[in-house]
Image: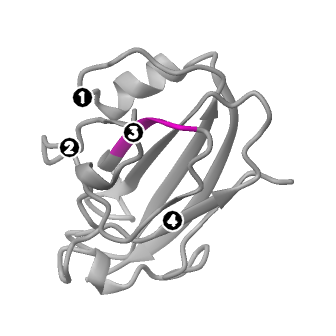
Amino acid sequence: MTFIITSSVFEKGAAIPAKYTCQGDDVSPPFSWEGIPDGTQSLALIIHDPDVPSPDNPTRIWVHWVLYNLPPDTTALVEHTNTADLPPGTREGMNDWNRTGYGGPCPPMGRHRYFHKLYALDTVLDDLHEPTRKQLETAMQGHIIAEAELIGTYQK
């Protein structure tokens, strides 16, 4: 079975509903996944926008959510997941608003792409103390068994 991540509120390549953005309730959309590879000890989720400030002239990546050490038997995150809703053992990293938790799309101009990347890891990572995306990616090096990706778009 192929390792995939999906959402019941938007399809691959489609627009993310405003409810999940700064122009709506700014809550996380629901996600589910399947095909977790054998040997997976934990999962990590990173949501980022590589089109900042403009898709025509991107200069940085904006990070919206960082989660790691999700148990491998986890197959979904519900809409409006917050710290209390996370599966036991899950750790949070810092987004680019300098806080943990989900921050929805809020592009300053143009239609941006939002990458929802789920990683299957062959280890449970040490406590990284609210890592940034880059710190988590460094810690995951050599431990990624598989990656699943869902891209959504949004424009104000």
Q: Residues within 10 Å of mark 4 (few under 14, many from 20)?
A: some
Tell me residue 46's x, y (percent): 43, 45
Q: The residue tagged with tag 4: helix, strand or loop?
A: strand
Q: Earlier in the sequence, mark 3 or mark 2?
A: 3
> Residue, x 53% and y 38% (percent of image)?
71
**Tag nearer the camera, 3 or 4:** 3
- Report how far apart the C-alphas of labels 2 and 1 lie in the structure: 7 Å
Name the residue beneath numbered marker 1. Answer: 130
- Report how far apart the C-alphas of labels 3 and 4 lie in the structure: 17 Å
Write down the region rendered in magenta: 66-71
Tell me residue 106's x, y (percent): 22, 69
Q: Residues within 10 Å of mark 1 (few under 14, many from 20)?
A: some
- Report how far apart the C-alphas of labels 1 and 3 lie in the structure: 16 Å
**Residue 100, which numbered label?**
2
Q: The residue tagged with tag 1: helix, strand or loop?
A: loop
Q: The residue tagged with tag 2: helix, strand or loop?
A: loop
Name the residue beneath numbered marker 4. Answer: 31
Q: Earlier in the sequence, mark 2 or mark 1?
A: 2
Give amino acid for label 1: Glu
- Report how far apart the C-alphas of labels 1 and 4 lie in the structure: 22 Å
Q: Residues within 10 Å of mark 3 (few under 14, many from 20)?
A: few
Tell me residue 38's x, y (percent): 80, 34
Please state if 141 lies on the left or on the right of 128 as rendered: right
Instruction: Judge by depth and name the residue closer to the eye, 73 or 30.
Output: 73
Name the residue beneath numbered marker 3. Answer: 88
Asked where in the image residue 13 lies, by quadrant, the reply is bottom right
